[in-house]
Image: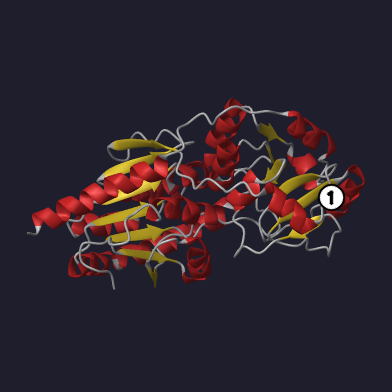
């Protein structure tokens, strides 16, 4: 149960990018501001790895994000996603009054939601300021799939848009979609935790020499069995090594090194390598840009956010878009040579968004405390 005068944070269960973005702001809140994080319990260990201040973790699921076909994490299964999303949204709305009562009973001063909409409805009903931290909404992601499917699917999109409009304000986190019809916009730039440059430590740990190039490799944990992993190992002859958090599903590769997430973050690896090969999610793209490390990424089908990320990476000058065929075949030789030669400039957006979000939340909490005196 949350504490009086505190902040209740609700984070979608879709991917670690939302967790990493939210925690960047949470870690900037003073330790004496009570924070309760409500998310899927399977993320609790990851929260504990990244939190740098006290917070209470409580289970909460009110959205499903986007579902991919088996073995293809770069594509959205529109029909399965909308079916699950409609079911979850209906269930969450049945509980919304109970959630509002919980916010009132605990004396919450503010609610922060990263992408999930229903807690914003609860916050409005509880008369608690509700802030949305987002670079897209699930309504934006679902809309083209709903248009294609027809039936009741467009109704779900309309219901989600209405739920998002309960927000007191929107922290618009770049790179973002336009998001002009949600709530009053507070432009915050990139919300990211910059990594620590630990290149010498990392290369020493992996036993690499001065001729070796090191690449942060992150393509997700699931559905990657069909990638041409043998091509990755061939690059050892070119003194190219890869580092990440997960081994190849095909078996151990001599030049794919695994480091523990308890000791390294993706941001640390982005700041400590010569290039990145990864799916262009919000967190990874921002970590690459703030570190100045060129990034190779595949196309992503059916996910509206990808357009904004792709534009930002290209505008920055360090983004290299691979074809789907090249990425699936791990045909990276020419792409990596381009990446190693790039010297991208600064990010196209301010990178202090986490501080801006935290400052506004602190102001809201202070106002709430004064209002109850």
Left-right relation of 145 to 59: right
Quadrant into which the N terminus falls: bottom left
Q: Evaluate whether residue 78 shows in this view.
A: yes
Residue 208 against residue 342 in the figure, above or below? below
The C terminus - image quarter: bottom left
The answer to whether residue 102 is left or right of residue 91 is left
Residue in the foreground of this view, choosing between 186 and 50: 50
| Residue ID at (86%, 58%) | 254
Q: Residue 296 appears in which quarter of the rendering? A: top right
Q: Position of residue 181 (x, y in %)?
A: 32, 36
Q: Residue furthest left?
A: 373
- Crowding at dot 1, Cα within 10 Å, few <14 / some 14-19 / many 20+, comes out as many
- Which residue appears at 78% of the width and 63% of the height? 249
Q: Residue 115, position in %: x, y?
A: 41, 51
- What residue lies at 59% left-to-right and 34% top-to-bottom? 310
Mark 1 lies on residue? 232
Q: Position of residue 129 (x, y in %)?
A: 22, 52
Q: How many marks?
A: 1
Q: Secondary structure at mark 1?
A: helix
In this rendered view, identify the residue nearer to me: 247 or 203. Answer: 203
Extreme residue toward the bottom, this view: 1
The answer to whether residue 286 is left or right of residue 34 is right
Above or below — where is 322 with respect to 23?
A: above
Q: Residue at x 42, y 63 (%)?
A: 88
Residue 315 sits in quarter = top right
> Where 301 sits versus 225, above or below?
above
Query: Which residue is farthest right?
Result: 237
């Amino acid at each position: 149960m949350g504490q009086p005068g505190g902040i209740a944070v609700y984070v979608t269960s879709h991917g670690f990018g939302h967790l990493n973005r939210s925690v960047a702001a949470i870690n900037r809140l003073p330790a004496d501001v009570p924070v309760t994080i409500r998310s899927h319990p399977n993320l609790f260990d990851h929260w504990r790895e990244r939190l740098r201040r006290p917070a209470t973790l409580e289970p909460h699921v009110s959205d499903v994000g986007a579902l991919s076909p088996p073995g293809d994490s770069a594509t959205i299964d529109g029909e399965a996603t909308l079916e699950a999303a409609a079911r979850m949204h209906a269930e969450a709305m049945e509980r919304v009054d109970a959630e509002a009562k919980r916010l009132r009973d605990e004396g919450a001063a503010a609610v922060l939601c990263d992408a999930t909409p229903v807690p914003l409805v609860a916050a409005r009903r509880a008369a608690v300021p509700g802030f949305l931290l987002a670079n897209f909404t699930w309504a934006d992601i679902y809309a083209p799939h709903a248009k294609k499917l027809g039936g009741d699917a467009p109704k779900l999109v309309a219901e989600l848009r209405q739920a998002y409009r309960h927000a007191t304000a929107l922290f618009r986190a770049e790179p973002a979609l336009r998001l002009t019809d949600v709530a009053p916009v507070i432009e915050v730039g990139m919300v990211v935790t910059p990594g620590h440059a630990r290149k010498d430590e990392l290369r020493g740990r992996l036993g690499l020499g001065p001729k070796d190039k090191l690449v942060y490799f992150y393509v997700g944990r699931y559905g990657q069995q069909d990638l041409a992993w043998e091509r990755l190992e061939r690059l050892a002859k070119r003194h190219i090594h890869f580092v990440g958090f997960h081994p190849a599903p095909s078996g151990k590769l001599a030049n794919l090194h695994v480091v523990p997430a308890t000791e390294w973050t993706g941001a640390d690896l982005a700041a400590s390598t010569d290039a990145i090969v990864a799916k262009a999610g919000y967190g990874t793209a921002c970590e690459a840009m703030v570190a100045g490390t060129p990034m190779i990424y595949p196309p992503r089908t059916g996910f509206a956010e990808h357009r904004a990320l792709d534009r930002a990476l290209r505008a920055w000058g360090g983004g290299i878009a691979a074809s789907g065929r090249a990425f699936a075949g791990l045909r990276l030789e020419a792409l990596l040579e381009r990446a190693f030669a790039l010297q991208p400039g600064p990010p196209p957006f301010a990178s202090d968004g986490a501080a801006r979000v935290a400052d506004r939340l602190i102001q809201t909490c202070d106002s709430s405390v004064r209002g109850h005196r």
